[in-house]
Amino acid sequence: MPSASKREQIVTTALQLFYQNGITATGIDLIISEAAVSKKTLYNHFHSKDELVLAVLRKRDEYFRNNLMRETEKQADTPKAKLIALFDVMDAWFHEKTFCGCMFINASGELFDSKSPSRSVCAEHKHLICDYVSELAKEAGAKEPKKLAKQLNILIEGAIVFAHVAGDKEAAQDAKEMGKVFINMALE
């Protein structure tokens, strides 16, 4: 198997470090050291830390959404069951040893410029997750699929924050019980 490109190596290392420590707390020198690349190599691929942050967020978005969809599809075979399974996928994530909350929520808290490209990627990630849930709601026959998707996403986002900030690893299961109420009401 060919080794990852230097660019990919830098992005993967930065993703792990940003997720564990935060964007602001993670300096370029640490990324260079952990990725085992030279400063010149890093700056050949990324002209600034902001460019690297943007690449990291895009990679995390792709990985997270693909994993969410794959695991949801694996756990359930009907659209309604998939809507409920979303919470089980979150539950499994909350119980991972490396769980440090949502990278997009965390990054938004650090990136104060609401017009920055990185903040836009964070917002886009949330919209794309909502679109996926909306599609499931539509397939399940929800009268207002976008409304149901928004309700479920608010529950999911709240569970993520509660699991991370309060350390309540059962937050997804609590949110699941509330989600079932919204799902059943929307499918009546």
Image (spheres, helix red, strand yellow):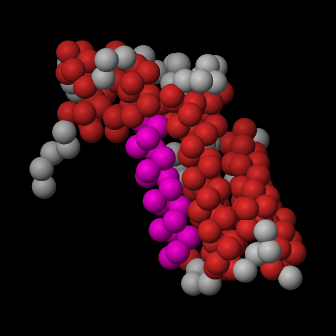
Asked if residue 172 lies left or right of residue 33, the reply is: right
Taking the image as shown, residue 35 lies to the left or right of residue 160, namely left
Helix, strand or loop for the magenta stretch, by majority = helix
**Could you say where residue 23 lies in the image, as x and y percent from the top left?**
51, 24
Whether residue 100 is in magenta: the answer is no
| Quarter that holds the N terminus | bottom left
Q: Position of residue 175 (x, y in %)?
A: 78, 60
Q: Residue at x 69, y 72 (%)?
A: 137
Say left or right for 18 vs 88.
left
Foreground: 139 or 73?
Answer: 139
Give x and y (percent) for residue 19: 50, 35
Residue 175 appears in the figure: no
Residue 110 percent location from the top left of the image? 61, 23
Quarter of the picture containing the C terminus is bottom right
The residue closer to the viewer here, 25 or 106, is: 106
- Magenta span: 56-74
Q: Is residue 69 magenta?
A: yes
- Residue visible at 52% across and 19% down in the picture: 25
